[in-house]
Image (cartoon, grey):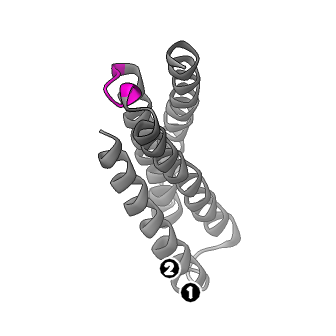
Amino acid sequence: MSKCFLILGSLNMAAVIMLGAFAAHGLKARLDTYALGVFQTAVEYQAYHAFGLLIIGLIGLTVPSLSASTGFKVSGWLMLCGILFFSGSLYALALTGTKWLGAITPIGGTLFIIAWINLAVVLWRQL
């Protein structure tokens, strides 16, 4: 499972670089300041949580008993889902201007919070 989270984290970091460059060079002239800020927030939080996935993968490699733990796996999957809901909804909001997409963003934020707290609990119990 650690390998999976390392790969997902790496792919998300590659996406962060591409999306950040796209915003800086391709969207700057097309989006207003608000939408560009929303897009940049999405990139920023995707980067934080891509690093989170990498950290989870590295912890799993360092402590193999954790890698098999259901709680440990749940942290990684919650983080990935958080990226999809939080950053994904903000990307869509920035690009389309569809305001109701902003209602999805807090779901992703909640998933991020639960992922980090769950990871802390798993580490507390297992280490």
Q: Which residue is mark 2?
A: 22
Q: Position of residue 58 (x, y in %)?
A: 46, 45
Quick one: 23 or 73, which is closer to the camera?
Answer: 73
Q: Which residues are magenta?
A: 65-70
Q: Which residue type carries mark 1? A: His
Q: Which residue type carries mark 2? A: Phe
Magenta segment main secondary structure? helix
- What is the quadrant of residue 69 in the picture? top left
Quick one: 82 or 33, which is closer to the camera?
Answer: 82
Q: Residues within 10 Å of mark 2 (few under 14, many from 20)?
A: few
**52, above or below 71, in the image:** below
- The residue at 31%/48% (across/down) is 3
Q: Position of residue 54 (x, y in %)?
A: 47, 50
Asked if the residue under mark 1 is in contact with the one under mark 2, i.e. CB atoms within 8 Å, the reply is yes
Describe the element under mark 2 as helix, strand or loop: helix
Q: Which residue is mark 1?
A: 25
**115, above or below 95, in the image:** above
Q: Which mark is residue 87?
A: none
Describe the element under mark 1 as helix, strand or loop: helix
Q: Quick one: which residue is furthest to the top in this view?
A: 125
Q: Residues within 10 Å of mark 1 (few under 14, many from 20)?
A: few
